[in-house]
Image: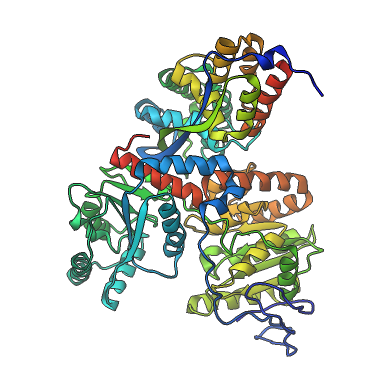
Amino acid sequence: MTERHGSDVESLEAGSVDSVKADEKAESNGQARARRKPQISDTPPPPPPAPTLADYEPIIGKSQVDELRFVARPLQGKRVKMVNSTAVGGGVAEMLNRLVPLLDELGVKTGWEVITGGNDFFEVTKGFHNALHGADFKFTPAAREVFLRNNEQNRQRMTFDEDFVVIHDPQPAGLIASKSGNSHWVWRCHIDLSHPNPDVWSFLQPMVEKYDATVFSSPAFARRLSIPQALFYPCIDPLSDKNKDLDESYIQNVCDNFGIDRKRPIVTQISRFDRLKDPLGVIQAYKMAKKYVDFQLVLAGGGASDDPEGAAVLQEVNEAAGDDPDIIILDLPPWCALEINALQRASTIVVQKSLKEGFGLTVTEALWKGKPSIGSAVGGIPTQIIDKHTGALVHSVEGCAYQIRYLLTHPDFGAQLGKNGREHVKENFLMTTNARRWVLLLGILSGAPA
Amino acid sequence: MSSTTTAELRSARTPFEFKSAAPLLFIEREQARNIEELLEALRTCPDGSIFQHTFRTLEEHHFIKEGFSNDFAQWAYTDLREVGLGERLTGLDIREFTSIAKLRERLIQIVEEFREATPSAKDSVSKTPFYFCSSKITVLPTQRSATNVVEFIEGLKQVSLHSIHYHFIEARLRRELETNDFSIWLRRDLGMEKAAKQLNQIDIYTSTLEGVRRKIVQTLQNAA
């Protein structure tokens, strides 16, 4: 369900938001007042073609692209296989969709294979995933057998004659049994292993330590292991729909469609409707700050249509927002990348007031757009928001409210934070930096001379 | 139209070859939540960690103009919330060090002195540990070289900030000298003694690395 408050809806010129006339029928949704519903495309747009290295040159500069090409030179003709558990959906597949063609263009022949398995396997691996994040999990002999059997079946089906094999996450970790003397194997762990379920981790650790190296997204997510652990921060693609530059007219049309007044300040949180993202805390902060400064609050994200808990959180958010026309709540389907991009670009400030967070790529996206950003000091957010340098770190609703007030009334300071934030992302969290880290790591593992 | 100066015409005996450096970060075993653990880790961590959290972090945060000196200072301020320690560590100027061993000694000394002067600090515990990392550097050639000051200025404008950091800041560890690659070449190959000295006076802690690049270029344009 997608909701909106505010003014008339106008037609849009680009993206997946269709030209619409406002739904004239007010939708009560159990609230005290009527809300209008903007029209969002029911189907995802076709994926854009993968960019080439030359496309990144205007963004990161020729010197950086030249350096990337040089770093890859010792690996010319080498072959890499990436293996994960899903071809579509999820951050890993999204990242591989961009990384694989980039490595290929750099002369490192990179293939990508996806493991297969039945429902029982993916139920076990989902349980593993949650358990490695610290959730309770009963690790039965049957679960162990399902995991090992499916890994073995995939191992028999696949070949591993590449120079490098990169296994993503725990699901295919057992493929390491195919490691031969000449190849280098890397386990890329995208999840937080800081507080793993001991039963699951003690099962996985001996497998992991057979790899030549691991890669983690944060030092806080890593374990003490006997093999080298590289640090690759997660990254965003500056040329994806979520992050590419947009025409001003498109941004305006998205705001018009969603009933957002661009003449007044806009504070936005982009997140799933999930309690750990603390949308209710954001509304509280809005109410505190609103006593001093005028602005609109946009809470936009997804998760309410495919997740019962998400629907419940959305309901709570709607109730907390009440009939305040300056709180705009948008439940968007996953293919609304262009709309999310436009909302971030239209924002005066972007907030990420999570109670718990992975790396927090929505923060990366906001920083890339040069937005003054306020984020909780949890997960990977402090790596991105260096307090008072690239944004404002907060620890409470009150802190969030104060920073909203401060940044709305000190736009020059906000602009400096935004400028620094963009540079921070450019240096550390872009897809091209990720590609460079991969070629550096593979080069180090193979002992290739620089 | 400006006339060509003597300095512009002077040709170097050996060309300046611009290089760059690509770092890769690794997570090390050491972590610290309080001053005692910080001291212990400073004593035992690999040299690459001291390098990463002092020299390299300046490159990673090259866009920050002031108030960011090194990761240890930043952690002491924002996580351990020991402002006195943060200030002392911020005062550390990496340009005074030509070896990691001496820099490590100085870091340990600062923390020990603070611990002695501030007994209450032993009770401070950070919710966020200091995670020690290290970096492995791959040195890269660029396609730029210079045989005179005009070409040199042009090269400075074109190379990446990684290259500026490599030649201007990291060089002192490589050369074990309190100077940088640019100044050495200007003095040795072009006889530009004064400009070489002026480059060493540029304050890297009150400017972004892009700002440092601009100041280097400006100094050379004035000298040429």
Toward the viewer: A198 or A385? A385
Specify the quadrant that holds the N terminus of chain A.
Answer: bottom right
Toward the viewer: A397 or A276? A276
The type of colouring in the image is rainbow
Q: How many labels does the image show?
A: 0
What residue is at 63 percent from the left and 11 percent from the top? B192
The x and y percentages for residue A360 are: 52, 57
Is residue A112 something that shows in the picture?
Answer: yes
Q: In this view, does A401 lie to the left or right of A448?
A: right
The x and y percentages for residue B181 are: 53, 19
The x and y percentages for residue A112 are: 35, 62
Q: Is residue B129 above or below residue A125?
A: above
Dividing the picture into quadrants, the one containing residue A269 is bottom right
What residue is at 41 percent from the left and 54 percent from the top? A104
Toward the viewer: A360 or B41? A360
Furthest residue toward bottom: A25
The x and y percentages for residue A133 are: 37, 60
What residue is at 44 percent from the left and 70 percent from the top? A89
Q: In this view, does A348 lie to the left or right of A105?
A: right
Specify the quadrant that holds the C terminus of chain A.
Answer: top left
Toward the viewer: A435 or A306? A435
Is residue A284 something that shows in the picture?
Answer: no
Dividing the picture into quadrants, the one containing residue B81 is top right
